[in-house]
Image (tube, helix red, strand yellow):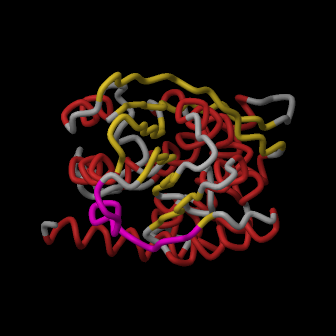
Amino acid sequence: MEQKFEQIREQQKETWNKFSSGWKKWDDLAMEFMKPVGDEIIRLLEPRNGHMVLDIASGTGEPGLTIASMLSGGKVIISDLAEDMLEIARENAAKRGIKNFETHTCDVCELPFPDNTFDSISCRFGFMFFPDMTLAVKEMVRVLKPGSRIASAVWDAPEKNFWVTATMGTIKKNMDLPSPPPDAPGIFRCAKDDVLSQLFKQAGLKNVSHKEIPGKLNCKTTDVYWNFITEVAAPVVDALDKADDETREKIRQEVFQAVKQKYPDGNVNIESSALVIYGEK
């Protein structure tokens, strides 16, 4: 891996470990929010008893743990770059009595598994953050058995994800932040519906398809939304850390105003949209 990618990987690892406590705190809300995407991934993969499944960028354990709960005689390998996130996944598995899984702290670009190991691979909201997406998909294809399936999810366009833009858009209006390179890891990096599809096809995957999956972030109140987004979203926290107290408070008030304007009845149930991309080896 190139040095610039290695640097990005180490930064990502540090960031996700740093924010693991926030993800643990908000795990119930976050997993409810992302469940429709996980359900679509599972539907496409059709996991069966005896299967070996790899869940990449699993974070606190999904959809890998749900897949494990469906299998008899099979196993799910839950992998992530951040060990602290996988610790939460192990805690979640213990609460649910799930035992047919293993966790592996590893980089998707250097998977520590032999060729043709897995019957299917899931990857929910990981690709946008991989330093080298081309190498990542090649590694996934390498460890996937011939004829087997892979399904991955990425966030759709900004205009369809108010749960992000309500805050990040307000921050950008109030702060002079440097623009990252267009190919830099980020939440909307794969928002165009052909980005990941083309990567899949270039890696030799067949029957590639994509589907839009709508969702809802059911915060109920603006306060819950603000606390959630400022405790789990690294770009938000990084930007607010650079703001003085006056600017930070102005941003908070404008976010509250934007959310209340969109949900005047006070029921903050924010729309989202994701793309699920599927392929076969």
Between 107 and 281, the residue placed more toward the observer is: 281
**202 lies left or right of 156:** left
Q: Quadrant of the N terminus?
A: bottom left
Q: Is residue 102 above or below residue 255?
A: below
Q: Is residue 21 above or below residue 179?
A: below
Image spot of residue 191 (x, y percent): 39, 33
Which residue is drawn at the image coordinates 77% and 30% (left, top)? 263
Image spot of residue 127 (x, y percent): 38, 48
Q: Is residue 69 above or below residue 77?
A: above
Say if residue 180 shows up in the picture: no
Q: Which residues are magenta?
A: 102-115
Image spot of residue 126 (x, y percent): 44, 51
- Per the image, is 146 magenta? no
Between 54 and 219, the residue placed more toward the observer is: 54
Which residue is drawn at the image coordinates 36% and 32% (left, top)? 280
Image spot of residue 219 (x, y percent): 78, 45
Say if residue 170 shows up in the picture: yes
Between 182 and 278, the residue placed more toward the observer is: 278
**200 lies left or right of 20:** left
Between 262 and 95, the residue placed more toward the observer is: 95
Q: Is residue 18 above or below residue 2?
A: below
Which residue is drawn at the image coordinates 46% and 63% (left, top)? 239
Task: Count how many numbered circles sit on residues in the image.
Answer: 0
Q: Quadrant of the C terminus?
A: top left
Occupied quadrant, residue 213: top right
- Per the image, is 108 magenta? yes
Farthest-out residue, left: 2
Which residue is drawn at the image coordinates 62% and 26% (left, top)? 214
Occupied quadrant, residue 233: bottom right
**39 lies left or right of 121:** right
